[in-house]
Amino acid sequence: MLKPLFLDDAGPSSVGQPVARREAVLKVTGEARYAADHHPEGMLYAVIAASSIARGRVTRLDVANASAHPGVIGVMTPENAPKFARHPDLKDSNPFTFRLDVLQDENVRYANQPVAVVIGETLEAATEGAYLLAPRYESDVARVQFDAGEPFTPNVIGGLYPPNESKGDVETALSSAAVRINATYRTPAQYHNAMEPHAIVAQWNGDELTIDTPSQALGLGRARIAGLFGLDVKSVLIRSPYLGGGFGNKALISGPQILGIMAARFTGRPVKLVLRREQTFGPVGHRAPTSQTLRLGAQADGTLTAIAHHSRTASSTFDDFFEPSGTLSHSLYATETISTTHDAVRLDIGTPLFMRAPGKAPGSFALECAIDEMARACDMDPLDFRLKNYAEIEPMSGKPFSSKALRECYAQGAQRFGWTGRPRAPRQMIDASGLLVGWGMGTATFPAKMFLAEARVVLREDGNATVACGAHDMGQGAWTVLAQIAADSLGLDLEQVELQIGRSDLPDGGMAGGSAGTATAGTAIHHAGKDVVAQLIDMATNDERSPLFRAGNAGVIARNGRLSRSDDEGRGETYSVILARAGRTNIEGKGNAAPDAVAQGNYATHSHGAVFAEVKVDPELGQIRVSRLVGAFAAGRIINPRLARSQYLGGMIWGVSFALQEHAIMDPRTGRPMNANLAEYHVPVNADVPSLEAIIVDEDDPYVNALGIKGIGEIGITGSAGAVANAVWHATGIRVRQAPITLDKLLWSQPSHARDGSSPSRALFD
Ligand code: MOS
């Protein structure tokens, strides 16, 4: 079993300590083995031949030519591919089951769909073989233009979100409002682009299957694979100790991963399959484009009276995933009337999927820009406007928040940024080198959720413990924070705890998704550790040979591997002594996690934050740079501030990337993504964000779960994208309502302060 290296000794309770990543040295020295680093004996390489059309069918594959290439072992096509026990197009009761393209027929439903798999002795042979297949197609006109589709009302993720919800009479409130905003914001298709592409090494041993592949949800993945191949779940072992980024599209097993498993069965040898970057633009999910119309109403004093949020999105022609962008408007700003509606169009694209704050990220871009526009229309400072409309209870549900330190986030963020003194009008600040300077802000929010999980803890006679939970570390720090929680629950030092995660044969760790990974696995581990301690206390307090005899449960504390009387800490004994006296070699404890029905029923559970952005815009070139970003976030108890800060900063950088860079461009003629590579699909590098700060705001949540943990993984992108967009407006006076805000859009937009019908190209030069 993997032995993480220890960098810090954080003392008695490490919870709340900035412990360094326990696996950091393994990662920076290359010792950590990711899925594609595995090379079992006799392993072959599989390469996908992907469709170059977006709609139609494959009429011919030159299998003979590909097979004849030296080193090619086999060519898997719909004609000869292993058959499934359960058809990959069949849905089941789990709303997270999506249809896969795994050579079930010749039909092509989107560009880059796998149409064949070539397996070779070397990667080069398989790659050349895939090229030699030279597919021919019968193709139909691809429908990839978001604006051309016929909208319908979707069933949002198996009914998880009703498409339409409302409170009060929003139309009447809008018509009687003193100030109104009606604006449409557009967000583009985006792709996850984790550093590590989907990769799998698959080995069959009879009907036993072992795979190395990155997974954010081992239990779901194992069940999906077992269902498709007709196996017992116990026959499927997934190993996923490290992920090179997940971002949502490693939460469910994808078609290409299934193809790797099929290729291993097809050849009877272990097979490795790794997607090339461009092959991740299609079969493994993405964020669909949105067009969101926000109509806001307010009284003359800036009191919001109505939020109407309509969101249009796209899904594939063959499955239902719809970005739930409007839901954010349920919980953020106090108003008497709210209406959120969703519709969608169907396009010849791969099915979209959960991606980096699904729904909330595009929804937040639109809502935070609209709120900024409304503050301007009311002639109020954007922060004052948000404080005036601060939600003391969740507006849509009427429930109290389980905790909400958003006021403190606003205050600490604004103070650190230096928001006071911001000129209200745009285009008022110029730096020493003549660049236009703008300041903008946004509110961040993300729901605090939990999934089901189990954990097992074994405390041994030497006083050390092994903690087992099939949790997932996709870079967020699970190897570290889950060990911290375990050590804390057991009253042990961190280095006395060995953590086992990232394997499907461990107790089900739930999912590292929905920003709920730590709350989920952490709660199960906490309860398992407490179970062990409770057993130790029973053993000691009922044994007359123990100094704790008859101390009673409440009268005992567990710390430093030792139980002692709370009224006299000198009287106690170590766990080892208790075990030895009882003749036990170990004690096993079990724990579970489940969403707390009372907390979820009675309270609105969300993390909150405030993000402040400074941008500089070149008035001649329109080039936009983010020069400073300050975020302040409150998310309940923080297990590890160093790793939490890293999560926040990562999320804020996504916000920059959302506002200014990320944009998948579809070719309307071919239906193919035109920038399916990291040279042309832009994500931020260090130079794109010179100064970043994330402030951790104290918050105690007594309701959300046993540990008081709310999510931190995805909140950073919310608020940040809008803050950057609002800063661009403040710098230039130009409101670009379409992400990403690129210099061409600035140059061709009319400034909102234009005095006359000046030509668009003069916008920035005036
Ligand atoms: Mo997140 S999109 O739930 O990985």
Image: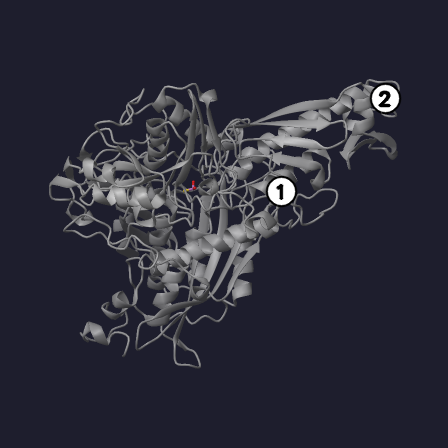
Label 2 or label 1, whichever comes before in sequence order: 1
* x and y, in percent, of residue 495 in the image: 70, 41
Mark 1 residue type: Pro
Q: Which mark is residue 668?
A: none
Write down the residue under mark 1: 4
- Left or right? Give the position of 734 relative to 715: left
**Residue positioned 51% across, 46% down in the render:** 475
Q: Nearer the viewer, residue 507 or 25?
A: 25
Q: Quadrant of the N terminus?
A: top right
* x and y, in percent, of residue 610 in the image: 48, 55
Closer to us: mark 2 or mark 1?
1
CB at mark 2 closer than 8 A to ligand 1? no
Q: Tag 2, which secondary structure?
A: loop
Mark 2 residue type: Phe
Residue 336 makes an appearance in the image? no
Q: Quadrant of the C terminus?
A: bottom left
Q: Tag 1, which secondary structure?
A: loop
Asked if 211 appears above or below 744 in the picture, the reply is above
Q: Nearer the viewer, residue 579 or 400?
A: 579
Write down the residue under mark 2: 549
